[in-house]
Amino acid sequence: MEPIVHGLEAEFGEQLIVRRLDANIHENEALEFSYGLRGHPAFAILDKTGEAAAVYIGPQSAETLRGAITAVLNPLNSAR
């Protein structure tokens, strides 16, 4: 999944921040739990307030993640 994330990170540039968490590091458990991340890989797309706008567990396509990111970045355009 990392190449997809790298591609989306490059595509959206400075419009988003990608944060990768290692599930094997104990200190990450509280943050993972707070967003309901229970599998690997897992993705949480956060809005500008830090709330989870979408959570995905398991492998996802670039199109799925791109759609969720676009919906958060451009909420008026995605509602049409």
Image: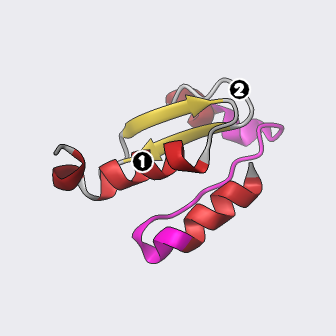
Tell me: residue 53, above or below residue 49: above
Residue 6 position within the rendered picture, expressed as x and y whole percent measured from the top left: 67, 64
* 29, above or below 19, in the image: above
Q: Residue at horizontal 77%, vertical 45%?
A: 22
Q: Are marks 2 and 1 in contact (CB under 8 Å)?
A: no
- Gap in angstroms between the C-alphas marked 2 and 1: 21 Å
Q: Counting other residues with Cα less than 10 Å from the Cα at mark 2, is it few (<14), some (14-19), or many (20 or more)?
A: few
Residue 13 marker: none
Question: Is the residue marked by circle 1 packed among few (<14), some (14-19), or many (20+) residues within 10 Å?
Answer: few
- Give, as a three-letter code, the residue at label 1: Gly
Judging by the rendered image, the residue that carries numbered circle 1 is 67
Q: Is residue 62 above or below residue 7?
A: above
| Residue 79 within the magenta-colored segment of the rendering | no
- Magenta range: 11-29
Quadrant where the C terminus is found in the figure: top left
Q: Residue 32 at what x, y percent from top left?
A: 61, 34
Q: Residue at x 57, y 62 (%)?
A: 8
Mark 2 or 1, which is nearer the eye?
A: 1
Q: Position of residue 33 (x, y in %)?
A: 58, 27
Left of 72 or right of it: where is 1?
Answer: right
Report the amino acid beneath label 2. Gly
Residue 60: x, y in percent? Answer: 63, 38
Tag 2, which secondary structure?
Answer: loop
Residue lying farthest to the right in this orientation = 24
- Identified at 61% across, 43% down, the residue is 61
For residue 51, side relative to residue 64 (left or right): left
Q: Quadrant of residue 15?
A: bottom left
Say left or right for 6 vs 12: right
Residue, disc 2: 39
Q: Give me the residue at 59% from left, 50% from top.
A: 62
Q: Earlier in the sequence, mark 2 or mark 1?
A: 2
The answer to if 17 sits in the magenta stretch is yes
